[in-house]
Image (cartoon, grey):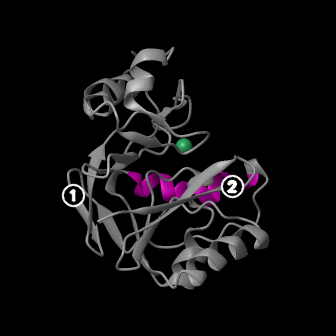
Amino acid sequence: MSLTIREFTFNAFAENTYVVHDETKEGVIIDPGCESQEERKQLQKYVESLDLNIKYILNTHCHIDHVLGNSFAKSTFNGMLAIPEGEVAGLNSVPLYAPMYGVNNYEASEPDHLIKQNEVISFGKTKFKVLFVPGHSEGHVAFYHESEKVCFSGDVLFKESIGRTDLPGGNHETLEKSIKEVMYQLPPDTIIYCGHGETTTIHHEKQYNPFVR
Ligand SMILES: [Zn+2]
């Protein structure tokens, strides 16, 4: 089995959106941040050119930059929108603060599934383990695949950086605990697909991350 991973960087926050599928052509979209028509076309073109069947639209957490394309992705690809159970309040608050970030065209969408801690998300022949990694936000999760050695961890850990904790639901001590007790327990060669910026590995962060070692 092997996973195909495609990264897009979308919206004014330079948020990374991932499309992941396996040989069955069933797949998921993680954190669809596509906001402009151009970005949405780009995503749609990719999914359609490979004839993918999108089973889930997954959110690692529900800050505005990670959910701007939820509604578009749900209606275009007919996938189920699955968000962490601890992020419902976060998702519901997006329309309230969107104008503060200059976003006036946000379309809200209802989740179809609430992801629980330690749940397994299945599509095609693939199973993602859900890791509960709060701190950047209250209900933040990461999606981990052990044998493929990949983890999609949103805004928990970045290459030589960490997620901010000054937004509502953020807590630095909690984030540090999530990184040390969950992320840093993954095998060192696990590739971390971040919500912003380049990919990294657990090995690299343990050695060079200036915030949490
Ligand atoms: Zn965030």
Range of magenta residues = 87-99
Q: In the rendered view, does 146 fall on the left or right side of 210?
A: left
Residue at x-position 62% and y-position 60%:
33
**Residue 56 in view (yes/no):** no
Q: Residues within 10 Å of mark 2 (few under 14, many from 20)?
A: some
Mark 2: which secondary structure?
helix
Observer-nearest of 113 and 212: 212
Q: Position of residue 88 (x, y in %)?
A: 41, 58
The secondary structure making up most of the magenta span is: helix
Residue 7, image x, y percentages: 58, 57
Q: Which mark is residue 98?
A: 2
Say above or below: 78 vs 87: below
Classify mark 1: residues with Cα within 10 Å, few (<14), some (14-19) or many (20+): some
Q: Quadrant of the C terminus?
A: top left
Between residue 122 and residue 71, name the one nearer to us. Answer: 122
Q: Is residue 127 left or right of residue 13?
A: left
Residue 123 at what x, y percent from top left? 31, 73
Q: Magenta segment: does it hold 89?
A: yes
> Residue 171: which quarter of the image?
top left
Name the disc covering residue 156, or none. Answer: none
Q: Which residue is rendered at x = 41% and y = 73% of the image?
A: 27
Q: Amino acid at mark 2?
A: Ala
Tell me the distance, in whole angstroms, between the alpha carbons under discs 2 and 1. 30 Å
Quadrant location of the N terminus in the rendered image = bottom left
Callout in the foreground (2, 1): 1
Compared to residue 42, the image places residue 169 above or below, namely above
Q: Which mark is residue 119?
A: 1
Q: Are marks 2 and 1 in contact (CB under 8 Å)?
A: no
